[in-house]
Image (spheres, rainbow, N blue to C red):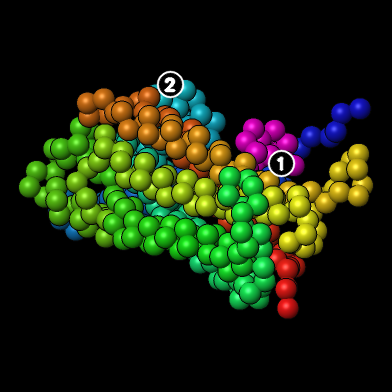
Amino acid sequence: MCAKESETDNEPFPFEHPFLSGLFGDSEIVELFSARADIDAMVRFETALAQAQAGTGIISEDVAKAIVSGLSEFAADMTALRHGVAKDGVVVPELVRQMRATVAGKAAEKVHFGATSQDVIDTGLMLRLKAAAEIIAVRLGRLIDTLGDLASRDGHNALTGYTRMQAAIGITVDDRAASWIAPLERHLLRLETFAQSGFALQFGGAAGTLEKFGDKAGTVRADLARRLGLADRPQWQSQRDGIAEFSNILSLVTGALGKFGQDIALMAELGTEIRLSGGGGSSAMPHKQNPVNAETLVALARFNAVQISALHQSLVHEQERSGAGWMLEWLSLPQMVTATGASLLIAERLAAQIDRLGTDEN
């Protein structure tokens, strides 16, 4: 007998899978990479573009208002978008066609004026990555505080220090906890520093020259960036180092969490220097409490370490725009962001399971 399926039972990725998401899921981050969030971000770009163009006299105020009003309740035909992507390789030509049909009248022809598909997609991505980074930063700060509380509670307790998987000398919980906390503090600083200017507007037009705006190009771009809350930077459509840099921070975060998970798993194996509540059951050995959260942190750290190589491969953009390099980002980047968000949630759960670290020698 087959289990009854619902419309959502066939999600292919573990972060959205009907039962694997119980292990890897992060609904808050996943939502940022949903089709709805993607389209909403692209609509934000198009409405802000019309407003910025009106501000410099490129289009009239009436036309801009018609575009903003027409797109305020825009609902995309998802089936048509899927067929459009299959034909064009990107969603924007069909999306713009639908937007123009919604706006209608003379204003319709000014929807997307002077922009290109990459401007819309990359800027929409930046809006969503910025939101994801804010979530990740909050979770990082919270985890740092939680681990600090553990160190305050058990820091004086004794531990056996291990080098190269062999017992070495005595240390304290404070010593090991410092190796968990310090990298996270550095990565939080890296993320906060990157966020100051790393999430930048992409706006270059057909080949990066904004040729339709003449000497007003810089003014339109600056106003558009301001309206979207993004950094104002010349087009970067074939320069993907910013995305690789952000992805590197993600991999560093999950790597540090993987180290935390690995340490806890090894301590749980020996069992004398840690007491964990909860744990995963075994179908064959009811007495076991498997360190599931710790193991999952290790797996996600290794996952992101693999994905970062794809983002480095995607740096190779030929001439003014690449199709292949761009697509590689679509396959890898959302997974990395979600893996990082999930890792932070899992690390919080794992920290909450630690009832005692080390042994009190007093």
- The quadrant holding residue 301 is top right
Query: Which residue corresponds to the image point at 31% horizontal and 53% vertical from the top-left?
Result: 198
Q: Which residues are magenta?
A: 7-20
Q: Which residue is mark 2?
A: 87
Q: Count all numbered tags in the image, as a single digit.
A: 2
Along the line of sight, the residue nearer the viewer: 65 or 121: 121
Q: Name the residue rendered at 87%, 28% in the picture.
A: 2
Residue type at mark 1?
Answer: Leu
- In the rendered image, residue 82, in percent from the top left (x then y), is placed at 51, 29
Q: Is residue 239 left or right of residue 290?
A: left
Q: Name the kind of residue labelled 2 in the image.
A: Lys
Pick the front one: 315 or 176: 176
Q: Is residue 24 left or right of residue 192?
A: right
Q: Position of residue 312 (x, y in %)?
A: 37, 34
Tell me the element at label 2.
Answer: helix
Specify the quadrant of the image occupied by residue 315: top left
Q: Which residue is mark 1?
A: 20
3D distance between C-alphas at marks 1 and 2: 33 Å
Task: Check residue 80 for magenta coloring.
Answer: no
Residue 316 sits above or below residue 222 on the image:
above
Looking at the image, which residue sits at the far left?
A: 215
